Image (spheres, grey):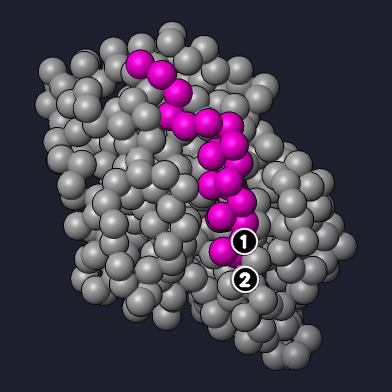
Amino acid sequence: MLQSVKEIARSISALDAKAAAAAQLHLDSLTKPPGSLGKLESVAMKLAGITGRVATSFPKSAVVVMAADHGVCAEGISAFPAEVTPQMVRNFLAGGAAVNVLARQAGAEVMCVDIGVDADIEHPDLIAKKIRYGTGNIAVGPAMSREEAEAAILVGFEIVKQAAARGVGCFVTGEMGIGNTTASAALMSAFTGIPARETVGRGTGISEERWRHKVGVVDRALACNRPDPADPIGTLAKLGGLEIAGLTGVILGAAANRCPVVIDGFISSVAALAAQRIAPESAGYMIASHVSQEQGHAQLLSLLGLEPMLHLEMRLGEGTGGVLALHLLDAACRIMAEMATFQGAGVSTSHENAKDGTPENGGNGL
């Protein structure tokens, strides 16, 4: 059994280059112009590299919704009160949140984890892994201890390990925590050096005045905690939320188990950045679902080398964009498994004059 985050990081290997190359050859043999399915083809190649199988599928997928509270809410940085976090956890467990609706449509399981909610919640479906009752106020001190940050990462890792053992092959990151866009902006600034005015967004829809206040809070958090970007666990401890650290563990766990992990919005992408700083090879297992309306998200994805599949002007979180992207992963898998090859269909492979998908004589672009 792995005992530390360092051991987990060492267990993550690079993608299977031979499988990815074989997937490219198979894609080029299918009855279509080369590259004409765009991002579906790049996703299919990535899935092959992750799993080591040219054609794969994911009968079981799960969105892991990590929930925790943030002491920085005491600074008045959110349009919603902190009590909304436990209320929304109960909504997840009742199946009434947006992520539940979209996960049902995608056939995905919702795993709701209490990793740091500032309330006691009891429910038979709740995964109770509380590290502490919310974080400290990062504007005046650290969010948590280093030991608590590492424990939260290990929670995420173990949840994925156990789910993978029962057949879950694809994971989606989700979160809930009033105030977590503030912690995420602080983490992004700490890891990248990008100033707070460029990483702080509108979150739940705050006013211009509250946005300026939020920027000031992040600046204070950076000044008083003085995080070292070369120490990702220490940076998570000083500025992060417990759910962000937990999602970092989910991402590392997916990579260690050679499973794709679909990264949701801004908060999830900050967790992805932390995971990448802990274990650089983990970035190969990440698939970006969408680019959100939150300021800094597009730049954050670019820093991770991830290309989002969807542009839907979303800013909800919870894993909603991630579960929508599962339909596209399924489409990529079906293309690899079900589409005919030129040889098998008896179709000519000459497409020199139709590489843009426009046929010379009509038809289907071949």
The image shows residue 215 at horizontal and vertical percentages of 29, 17
Q: Is residue 240 above or below residue 39?
A: above
Q: Main secondary structure of the magenta part?
A: helix
In the rendered structure, which segment of residues is drawn in magenta?
A: 140-160
Q: Secondary structure at mark 2?
A: helix
List x then y, in percent, for residue 165. 67, 76
Q: Looking at the rendered structure, which numbered label has been put on residue 325?
A: none
Q: Is residue 224 above or below residue 98?
A: above
Q: Residue at 47% of width from left, 58% of height from top? A: 129
For the N terminus, the image quarter is: bottom right
In this rendered view, identify the residue nearer to me: 178 or 19: 178
Label 1 residue SS: helix
Residue at the extreme bottom: 345
- Quadrant of the rendered image containing residue 353: bottom right
Q: Report which residue position mark 1 lands on.
A: 158
Task: Identify the residue position indicated by label 2 in the image.
Answer: 162
Q: Can residue 268 be seen?
A: no
Mark 1–mark 2 CB contact (< 8 Å) = yes
